[in-house]
Image (tube, rainbow, N blue to C red):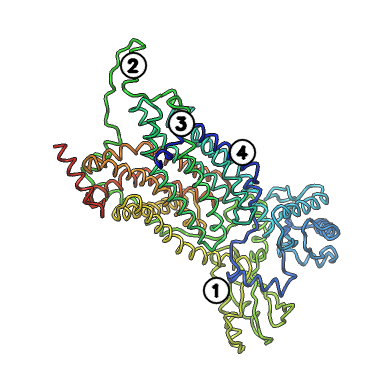
């Protein structure tokens, strides 16, 4: 009964029923539930309430409510020096925003009431730049924030003859304005992701379609995986929308963008595994339904195992404390689960409906069918001479020289992996955006003409117990501090004081992040010298620099938890499927080696090839999940073939034929999957460029080095022990086949 159900989607009756079920699900879900894009959130925090910077923020919100809100900084600049008419016009803009506040505007300083001389005193020392802060309400969402920014832009445009927001950076004789700060940066980031969604979707579809056409040279067959993935996507989107609508999980633009790539890449791979097997059986079986039944039997286990490996690996991201990583878990794992189901049901149904015609114009036929076709045309049928292809040659070489192959590939991968120790990491999200992004240009203006710390001051909060302290003097004496303002006393508890520390360097830099702990230690020491007990527990550091330091600490902890969990889950799944401790160990070991090699080669390409100074600190974890989980897919598919063949022939021959049999389909799958991740490199967001590059390299290493060379070589070297602890049965089968061969 179970076997009949398993083969149902590909049989004569089940194919149409299966297709109709998927179409009905597509229609019902899209009618009943909202789309994922309508439920995505861009305001969810990445840090938990127990993060030090968030504890500082909670105290600041309670004791210093005037400092609440999302700040936008209006940076005004004229290279030749701000003129009086510029300052008067700027005051007019401030007056407009004071009289008619922008949407969700919380406050703006009354600069329009200041005498010109006083306002001139706020201009940078070189007389070229002025900053006007505008605060938006604390919980303002992306759409409301965009409305507020548009209102500010309208006020600026209506004041000037030439809109300073449209003046190009570097212009010397015109007034230039840019909206930056957390509000401006957040809005620009959302726009970048929004603009990239369609580009990413069309780019992914295009690369998959082109590669499928090149590989199979069949327009019909090239569309089959895309139809399967498209229907799966149409079901995933409303399911995610339903989940988001009920508040069961959160997801953002970045997650949905990467999900699209993952779905088309991995989904097409699963389809290729089935298509390859179906084509092979069509060359042996005249009945297309028999061929499909055999194809499902031979490939479904590997597809299901591969899919579950990825699903469980992605679900491990739920253990992450960092919000951005945690939010990937549900959309990614759900997309793979649905796509796996589609590959095992929907795609077999479509292929069974199309039959051999799906491979047109290169239709696979049995020898007897070819003979009959030739006779009808009045031609003489000559059975094709089987040539030893590249796969058989590689497999044969591995069988003869396994040690040389294993050592050579390990050495190559090891050298690449060494460079992973040279990688520099950054947590400066601003640096990942294009240099001509308005908010980044505004930040550059502030950094060049003021203290860089003006953009994101560090907030030092201390419970002084009502005692006089030297906190301000001590902090001002530090070489990395530009200025300190305060103290400001708490609204509810005057003993709690707030100091605003402006750093003398880029507040987003690793160096600035490194000073957070020093600020905390020195402030606590001042409290201790003042006789305050538990001084370390009475200092809180907030601000963007402190948040980045927390991000670094939390993502490191997440990696230390998630990576072992993923490896453990993959090990359990492999043990259950292969029933071999030995094979499980070296399959995991080789894919981990390829991961570090991908990091190293990725760094060589990005750093030495394109001058990238650092990559985002959480990219290694992102890359690990995809490289290890997806890379293990190819090993599973190949090793399952070797296992199956080893029951009928000696191990060396099973390896030779297993490599040859899986070579073409895995190479095709690897190229498509790597190609889809490379689409990320076309986006103007460096985080995705770096992630896409490293992940694509990892997949290619698995495809062209680990899978065809290293894993088979290790299998031959280990020999009968590759099946341990089930070595006895396998050994008996091998000996039996060897005796038959002799």
Callouts 3 and 2 close, C-beta under 8 Å? no
Q: Mark 4 points at which residue?
A: 27
Q: Distance between the residues labelled 3 and 2?
A: 24 Å
Disc with the residue nearer the chain's start (3 vs 2): 3
Q: How many marks?
A: 4
Nearer the camera: disc 1 or disc 3: 3
Point 57% across, 83% down: residue: 525
Disc with the residue nearer the chain's start (4 vs 3): 4
Q: In which quarter of the image is the C terminus?
A: top left
Callouts 1 and 3 close, C-beta under 8 Å? no
Q: What element carries label 2?
A: helix
Q: Name the residue under label 1.
A: 517
Callouts 1 and 4 close, C-beta under 8 Å? no
Q: How far apart are marks 1 and 3 (CA)?
A: 61 Å
Nearer the camera: disc 4 or disc 2: 4
Q: Distance between the residues labelled 4 and 3?
A: 22 Å
Residue 418 drawn at (x, y percent): 37, 57
Q: Mark 2 points at which residue?
A: 372
Callouts 4 and 3 close, C-beta under 8 Å? no
How packed mark 2 is, by other alpha carbons closer than 10 Å (few <14, some 14-19, many 20 or more), is some
Which label number is shown at residue 351? 3
Nearer the camera: disc 1 or disc 4: 4
Disc with the residue nearer the chain's start (4 vs 2): 4
Point 66% across, 86% down: residue: 465
Q: Distance between the residues labelled 4 and 2?
A: 44 Å
């Amino acid at each position: 009964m179970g076997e009949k159900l398993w083969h149902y989607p590909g049989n004569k009756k089940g194919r149409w029923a299966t297709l109709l079920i998927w179409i009905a699900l597509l229609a019902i879900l899209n009618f009943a539930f909202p789309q994922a894009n309508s439920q995505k959130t861009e305001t969810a925090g990445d840090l938990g309430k127990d993060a030090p910077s968030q504890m500082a923020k909670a105290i600041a919100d309670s004791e210093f409510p005037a400092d609440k809100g999302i700040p936008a900084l209006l940076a005004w600049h004229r290279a030749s020096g701000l003129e009086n008419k510029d300052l008067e016009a700027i005051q007019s803009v401030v007056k407009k925003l004071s009289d008619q506040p922008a949407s969700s505007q919380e406050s703006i300083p009354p600069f329009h009431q200041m005498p010109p001389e006083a306002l001139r005193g706020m201009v940078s020392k070189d007389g070229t730049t002025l900053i006007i802060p505008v605060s938006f309400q604390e919980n303002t969402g992306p759409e409301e924030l965009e409305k507020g920014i548009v209102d500010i832009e309208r006020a600026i445009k209506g004041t000037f003859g030439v809109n300073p927001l449209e003046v190009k950076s570097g212009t010397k004789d015109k007034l230039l304005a840019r909206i930056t700060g957390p509000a401006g940066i957040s809005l620009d980031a959302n726009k970048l992701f929004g603009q990239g969604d369609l580009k990413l979707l069309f780019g992914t579809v295009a690369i998959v379609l082109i590669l499928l056409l090149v590989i199979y040279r069949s327009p019909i067959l090239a569309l089959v995986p895309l139809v399967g993935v498209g229907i799966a996507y149409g079901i995933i989107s409303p399911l995610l929308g339903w989940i988001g609508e009920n508040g069961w999980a959160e997801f953002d633009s970045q997650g949905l963008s990467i999900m699209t790539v993952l779905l088309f890449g991995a989904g097409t791979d699963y389809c290729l595994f089935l298509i390859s097997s179906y084509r092979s059986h069509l060359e042996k079986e005249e009945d297309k339904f028999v061929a499909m039944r055999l194809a499902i039997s031979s490939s479904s286990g590997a597809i299901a195992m591969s899919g579950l490996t990825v699903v469980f690996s992605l679900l491990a991201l739920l253990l992450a404390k960092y919000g951005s990583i945690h939010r990937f878990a549900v959309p990614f794992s759900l997309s793979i689960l649905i796509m796996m189901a589609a590959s095992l049901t929907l795609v077999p149904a479509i292929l069974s409906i199309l039959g051999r015609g799906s491979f047109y114009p290169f239709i696979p036929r049995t020898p007897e069918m070819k003979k009959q076709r030739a006779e009808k045309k009045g031609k003489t049928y000559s059975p094709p001479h089987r040539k030893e292809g590249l796969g058989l040659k590689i497999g044969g070489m591995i069988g003869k020289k396994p040690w040389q192959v294993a050592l050579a590939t390990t050495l190559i991968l090891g050298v690449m992996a060494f460079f992973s120790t040279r990688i520099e990491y950054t947590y400066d999200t601003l640096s990942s955006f294009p240099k001509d992004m308005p908010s980044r240009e505004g930040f550059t203006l502030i950094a060049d003409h003021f203290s860089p710390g003006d953009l994101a001051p560090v907030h030092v909060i201390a419970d002084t117990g009502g005692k006089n302290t030297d906190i301000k003097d001590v902090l001002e004496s530090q070489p990395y501090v530009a200025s300190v303002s305060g103290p400001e006393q708490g609204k509810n508890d005057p003993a709690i004081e707030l100091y605003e520390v402006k750093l003398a360097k880029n507040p987003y830099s690793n160096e600035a992040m490194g000073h957070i702990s020093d600020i905390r230690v020195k402030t606590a020491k001042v409290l201790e010298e003042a006789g305050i007990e538990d001084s370390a527990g009475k200092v809180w550091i907030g601000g963007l620099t402190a948040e980045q330091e927390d991000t670094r600490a939390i993502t490191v902890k997440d990696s230390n938890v998630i990576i072992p969990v993923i490896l453990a889950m993959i090990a359990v799944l492999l043990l259950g499927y292969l029933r071999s401790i030995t094979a499980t160990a070296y399959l995991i070991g080789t894919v981990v080696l390829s991961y570090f090699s991908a990091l190293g080669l990725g760094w060589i390409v990005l750093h030495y090839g394109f001058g990238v100074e650092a990559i985002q600190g959480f990219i290694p974890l992102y890359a690990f999940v995809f490289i290890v989980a997806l890379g293990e897919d190819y090993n599973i598919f190949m090793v399952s073939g070797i296992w199956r063949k080893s029951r009928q022939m000696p191990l060396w021959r099973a390896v030779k034929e297993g490599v040859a049999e899986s070579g073409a389909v895995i190479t095709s799958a690897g190229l498509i999957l790597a190609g889809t991740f490379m689409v990320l490199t076309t986006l103007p967001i460096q985080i995705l460029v770096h992630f896409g590059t490293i992940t694509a390299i990892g997949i290619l290493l698995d495809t062209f080095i680990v899978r065809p060379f290293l894993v088979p070589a290790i299998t031959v070297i280990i020999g009968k022990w590759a099946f341990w602890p089930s070595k006895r049965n396998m050994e008996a089968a091998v000996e039996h086949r060897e005796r038959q061969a002799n």
